[in-house]
Amino acid sequence: MTKEKKDFLRTPLRTIAADRPFFAALIGVFVAGIIYMLVMGFTLQVRDVQVYVRYTAFGEAHFYKSYWYYLLSFVLFGALVMVVHIGLMVKLYSLQRRQTALFVGAAAVLVLLVAASYGLAVMHLAYR
């Protein structure tokens, strides 16, 4: 890598690391994402039979079944939320929008909390 590319990456990372409250918010989003993925991952159960994976008020059955690995999408959702929100926070911080970046971090934790409650309800329904 050339010197310009190294400086392009190092300079924002140094300024973010120097801002301790913002860096703590980044770490908080990262930890919340990891905890969400661990909880969803350890809640999964490998089964040979199909499990309930979706509910809708439309249609005849209301409950739809599929194989257990469909529920892995809950774990992948947590990874996606974590990576995208951390990326948004870093980008907003580099544009001198620190307060907006902190709001995005708080929104990420809230999204992960709501997703955890929803995901655990789906897992409970799937494995009853």
Image (tube, grey):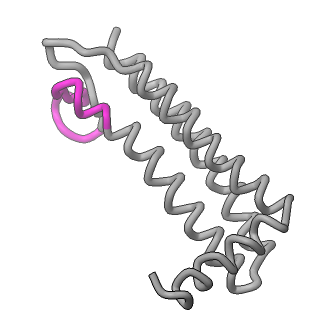
Marks counted in the figure total 0
Between 69 and 125, the residue placed more toward the observer is: 69
Find residue 17 and report its horizontal and vertical position in percent.
77, 64
Pick out the residue farthest to the top: 128
**Relative to 25, does residue 51 appear above or below in the rendering?**
above
Was residue 62 drawn as part of the magenta stretch in this picture? yes
Find residue 114 and report its horizontal and vertical position in percent.
58, 40
Was residue 114 drawn as part of the magenta stretch in this picture? no
**Residue at figure coordinates x 26%, y 23% from the top left:** 52
Between 19 and 32, the residue placed more toward the observer is: 19
Residue 86: image quadrant is bottom right
**Relative to 90, does residue 118 appear above or below in the rendering?**
above
Question: Relative to 120, is 12 on the left or the right?
Answer: right
Pick out the residue farthest to the bottom: 4
**Relative to 90, does residue 27 appear above or below in the rendering?**
above
Find residue 82 and report its horizontal and vertical position in percent.
53, 52
Give, as a single range, the part of the protein colored magenta.
Answer: 57-72
Pick the quarter of the image with the C terminus.
top left
Residue 40: image quadrant is top left
Question: Relative to 106, is 86 on the left or the right?
Answer: left
**Relative to 20, does residue 12 appear above or below in the rendering?**
below
Residue 87: image quadrant is bottom right
**Residue at figure coordinates x 23%, y 29% from the top left:** 69
**Residue at figure coordinates x 54%, y 35% from the top left:** 36
Find residue 46 and report its horizontal and vertical position in percent.
25, 15
Pick the quarter of the image with the N terminus.
bottom left
